[in-house]
Image (tube, rainbow, N blue to C red):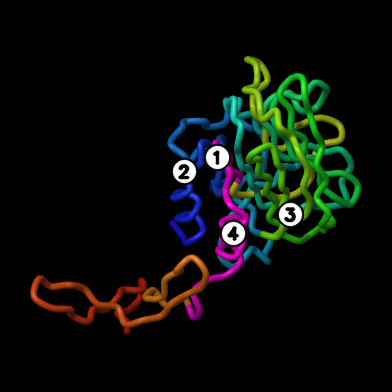
Amino acid sequence: MNAYEQAVHGDAPVAWWKLDEPQGAQQALDSSGGGYHSTAVGVTLFGQDPGGMPAGLPGPAAGTGGNGITVPFRGGNWPAFTAEIWVRPADTQNNRFILGTGRTWASPYTGMCLVATTGGYVFRVGNGSSQGQFAVSAALEPGQWQYLAISLDGGIVQVYADGAQSGSGSHAAGLLEAQAGDAGVLFLPGEPAWQGLAMQAAFYDHALTPQRIAEHYQLGTTTAPGGAPWRAWTGTQWAEGELKAWTGSGWASVRVWDGNDWIP
């Protein structure tokens, strides 16, 4: 796993679709350990790399082509949660579903979803009787990768774009687990269907802090300078030092195989 994926794994997502399957794959695999692998996805375009991938996320990504991915994930009865995804829209969208769990396309909502609207994004949250809609102030940018996240904690909703808070509101009711038949979706198919690329979609049954969400974005957009394997992410920055190992009686310098040669 790269540094971004190590951070996500360490934050214990309850569902996590990297969407980095190779071309020809027929499933989006869940990397959380929860087993929420998608059903067959038809002609959804896995293995897409048009260039310009975020520096910390080499990809590939999944392209929708107007097709949806259904996953057997219905969320949970959560008073707190976080959801995140990286998206690269193909055009200015209007009422197109990107990520969701539960009944989020018609009232009353029972879960959450991310919807691309004309020139922007909206998160919807509901528990079957109480619902809310929270706009992301950042603009939708066709052809550009954007990191979007939402968290709910203590009745307060915060939405994020590229690691920075981009909207907030209140929703004391929390989430309600979706009913059978209202499974989770990535790129809900239909008319109009969302068009673009996406990767690294994850749900957590707890709220990540604003600082942690900012770190996820930073890890996704940066790499260790020079790719040096002895540089490590401290949580706020890359730290560099000589790589050593404990021999049992003292520290000894070691070398690293980069795939072609031994370095230092």
| Quadrant position of the N terminus in the picture | bottom left
Q: Earlier in the sequence, mark 2 or mark 3?
A: 2
- Can I make out residue 181 in this image? yes
Other-residue count near label 4 (Cα within 10 Å), few / some / many at <14 / 14–19 / ≥20? few
Q: Is residue 40 magenta?
A: no
Mark 1: which amino acid? His
Task: Report the residue marked by disc 4.
Answer: 211
Q: Earlier in the sequence, mark 2 or mark 4?
A: 2
* Residue drawn at point x = 56 percent, y = 38 percent: 28
Q: Nearer the viewer, residue 101 or 150?
A: 150
Whether 60 is drawn above or below 128: the answer is below
Mark 4: which amino acid? Gln
Q: Earlier in the sequence, mark 4 or mark 1?
A: 1
Q: Magenta segment range?
A: 201-226
In front: mark 4 or mark 3?
4
What SS does tag 2 mark? loop
x and y percentages locating residue 216 in the rendered image: 57, 58
* Residue drawn at point x = 36 percent, y = 81 percent: 241
What SS does tag 4 mark? helix
Q: Earlier in the sequence, mark 4 or mark 3?
A: 3
| Quadrant position of the C terminus in the picture | bottom left
- Do labels 2 and 1 touch, CB within 8 Å? yes
Residue 206: numbered disc: 1
- Do labels 3 and 1 touch, CB within 8 Å? no
Task: Report the residue marked by disc 3.
Answer: 88
x and y percentages locating residue 144 in the rendered image: 76, 61
Q: CA distance from mark 4 to mark 1?
A: 14 Å
Task: Report the residue marked by disc 2.
Answer: 12
